[in-house]
Image (spheres, coloured by chain):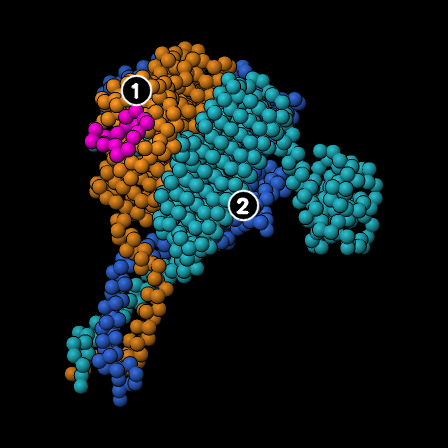
Chain colours: A orange, B blue, C cyan
Amino acid sequence: MEFTINQIAAMLGGVVKGDGNLKINMLAKIQDAKPGQIAFLSNPKYEQFIYTTHASAVIVSNEFVPRKEITSVLICVRDPYNSFTVLLQEYYKMVSFQKTGIEEPSFIGKGSTVGESVYRGAFSYIGNNVRIGDNVKIYPHVFVGDNITIGNNVILHPNVKLYADTKIGNNCVIHAGVVIGSDGFGFAPQSDGTYKSIPQMGNVIIEDDVVIGANTVIDCATMYGDSTIIRQGVKLDNLIQIAHNVEVGKNTVIAAQSGISGSTKIGEHCVIAGQVGIAGHIEIANNTSIGAQAGISKSIKEEGQKLIGYPVFDVKDYFRSYAVFKRLPDLNERLRQLEKVVNGVKQENPVINDSAPS
Amino acid sequence: MEFTINQIAAMLGGVVKGDGNLKINMLAKIQDAKPGQIAFLSNPKYEQFIYTTHASAVIVSNEFVPRKEITSVLICVRDPYNSFTVLLQEYYKMVSFQKTGIEEPSFIGKGSTVGESVYRGAFSYIGNNVRIGDNVKIYPHVFVGDNITIGNNVILHPNVKLYADTKIGNNCVIHAGVVIGSDGFGFAPQSDGTYKSIPQMGNVIIEDDVVIGANTVIDCATMYGDSTIIRQGVKLDNLIQIAHNVEVGKNTVIAAQSGISGSTKIGEHCVIAGQVGIAGHIEIANNTSIGAQAGISKSIKEEGQKLIGYPVFDVKDYFRSYAVFKRLPDLNERLRQLEKVVNGVKQENPVINDSAPS
Amino acid sequence: MEFTINQIAAMLGGVVKGDGNLKINMLAKIQDAKPGQIAFLSNPKYEQFIYTTHASAVIVSNEFVPRKEITSVLICVRDPYNSFTVLLQEYYKMVSFQKTGIEEPSFIGKGSTVGESVYRGAFSYIGNNVRIGDNVKIYPHVFVGDNITIGNNVILHPNVKLYADTKIGNNCVIHAGVVIGSDGFGFAPQSDGTYKSIPQMGNVIIEDDVVIGANTVIDCATMYGDSTIIRQGVKLDNLIQIAHNVEVGKNTVIAAQSGISGSTKIGEHCVIAGQVGIAGHIEIANNTSIGAQAGISKSIKEEGQKLIGYPVFDVKDYFRSYAVFKRLPDLNERLRQLEKVVNGVKQENPVINDSAPS
């Protein structure tokens, strides 16, 4: 990146105080910034740094009134933190999508087409009859199987593996080592104790705006014509297992190392923490929040619950129960003491127990 | 695939009603099928669809009597569901094994041999002194290290990584991203607080008919001459960890994200659910069934148990205990009430506790 | 490897009894050894094998006095087990680092440099402005992104993926499928229920002597200039998740499938078992030992604790509580019996409860 301060100010709708023709090539924190870099000042705690920073430019609030001399050029905006975030995002997008062209050797099969501004890294492999949209970035060692469709503005990081027939929407980011479309885990037990593989012939559909973390695996659906579906806006962290025929609803977020078993349907706007396990053939209602390491064995029908435990129940109740769990040996001892007392009473004064005194 | 209906009927031992010369190129569900496709009708609930389906052929029971006109050709068999499954399996096998030949660039080292009908995808790597059998499919980006032996009819999906000296039997399917033969996790603590790596010089043996899910890892044995062994017919799901010197017995099935620690021996016909953890240096008896997220810290000696919890015990007992766990705050309160009563009694009527009234 | 027995004896400071000019090409266990191999005898239990072994040489204690004829050449040392381990380590190092040179096709970008004795396997990819030290082994399908620095004596096993800007020290071993530098899982919730990705612009620093197991993932830090840091001597097992901005302290060991959430700081010399989950933004004191499948939700401030459970507490207390948990239905029943007795007393003899008899 290389922009003048004036160009950046125009982008942010800000006002420049100082030489707007200086060039900026990087973003930085105000305490670390070097010449050629731009920083921001939002939290007053950091004000001291604006008088000593080497940043060429600092984004400040319209209200900011310097108490000492400042050598940096200022860009005055309504909300400096928000403006810096916008800048970060633009910069990140620029960096992420900067590669174009074809590095050799790379492989593309028969009948496959790619759009404009596509990057195909060295050793990337595209099978037959693949449709790839515009501005797609295919890093080295990516495998795209036959009959796959990929939308626009998609990033496939190094070594993503897409089995045949996968469909990927627009604006998706898929991280290194992700496997999409591998066989579901389906085996028919035979009378001799062995298992026969059930053919896994469906596919996986990833809708728009989905992010998938490194080394996560998403299995294909079992039947031809069926799909494992990751809905629009879903964010999956690293090392997650999504089994065959699962559907994850819109804008649901799942943290690392969680696993969803076959044919389960997760609702929209759910938040699932790390290392959670969810059984097969169940449904999780919208807006469900599931705590770390929880295990879910039955459908969650009521929306908006916060759950934890194995099997899960209300998170507050879990911690109340767990507080007692930690004192169980004490509880047990108290019970024994009571038994001693009461049984002592019983033995020594049988009348109390066996018949009412008149 | 492209077969005539007559050919398919012959394969299934069925009788054709209609034009057996029509060509079939795909399997489908009866409600979705298009011309050129074959479907089946087994469940009477779906009978309505046979009168409107666009399938070129439908597999039906010998007993089936149409109540309206049907445009599809019928193949009459004893068990339509079973026949369709046979067809599915044949089709799947055909699709899975259809690739042959060598895509370039690919790499093969010195002294390595491959059998008949082998596929070697672009960017696949085969080291030195490797023996590969017939009908093996090596997808792009697969790495086969030195001195490896692979049997017949094996599929190595994209990006499988086999470290040197691995042995793989016949009819195995190994999914994308699987790592076999990586170093076991062995470190000798030193007096200065650091750890020295213990050389991991053994290998991994995968017997016949094993399926291994995507991104699963199987470490090699520690000592030269020893092996981590996956016995015949074992099915491993995705993202599983198998540590050094583990042995998994015949026809055992392990679900996703479970982990087996070093030197543990799992029996035959065990069923291990997802996210289970098993400690090192123990043995699990045959036919053991372990529930999701369970943790096993000691050997399971009695066969045929169903276990769960951490550490595991009988699954029914676990759920009975857990039912009480959920009410522990209530239990605690009941205990306090009793204590109040009884201690109230004690304080107010010390005689009852300290000596028997006569 | 091929050494004479004399050369090996010199390396171990041992004394040869027999023909020191015989050649050795492999290490083996005494009961399995073949001609050309060297074994050791330490445990007296195995003495029987020294009289029948086919090993060309056996390492024995200086004190060892044969009771029968031995055909193998002996190397007498102070501690045979330790000597054999030294030999194992030397052999392993030799094997691990034996590959050198460049296999084609391989890819190297602009402005990148590699040191002496480097191996670059076929289909390996090195981006732009990369600095690679001496004796680095880059196996096939490895991806090294732009602006990366790698020290000396590092092994990158097949298919390791390093995102741009990663820094790796000396003597590190990184196993197949490891991903370093993927985006942290950071998303800003928007008012319409969607999430916006927070740009992840930091990097990952791996210090010297670190081992990272297969398919483990380490995310980059969020802010430009910040780093996720794995300190010197850390050993990570397979399939571990290390989130953005985490720091793992010196010589800490983490077993397979554990996960550390964002911005958490793990102390030095900690031992973390398998499938452990640690929440974000907390600190774990030095020398903390965490049991398998434990969940940590709050900072651990006191050093040297042994913890387990979810959330964790003292491991002995956990097992005491768990022992009672297993008997909870019984506890509940005992409580009910007591209630019956005491409430029976209450109902039948209200005087006892409500007022003291005089």
Q: Residue at x 36, y 51 (%)?
A: C311
Q: Is residue A29 visible?
A: no
Q: Is residue A80 left or right of residue A220?
A: left
Q: Residue at x 39, y 55 (%)?
A: C313
Q: Which mark is residue B262?
A: 2
Start and end of the magenta stretch?
A58-74
Q: Secondary structure at mark 1?
A: loop
Residue C70, image x, y percentages: 81, 48
A174 relative to B295, above or below: above
Q: Residue at x 35, y 48 (%)?
A: C297
Which residue sits furthest bottom? B358
Amino acid type at image mark 1: Asp
Residue A281's quadrant in the figure?
top left
Q: Which mark is residue A197?
A: none
Q: Which residue is mark 1?
A: A19
Q: Chain of mark 1?
A: A
Q: Secondary structure at mark 2?
A: loop
**Is A66 contained in the magenta span?**
yes
Q: Main secondary structure of the magenta part?
A: loop
Q: How many marks?
A: 2
* Crowd around label 2: few <14 · some 14–19 · many ≥20 (10 Å): many
Q: Nearer the viewer, residue C214 or C199?
A: C199
**Is C291 contained in the magenta span?**
no
Q: Nearer the viewer, residue B82 or C240?
A: C240
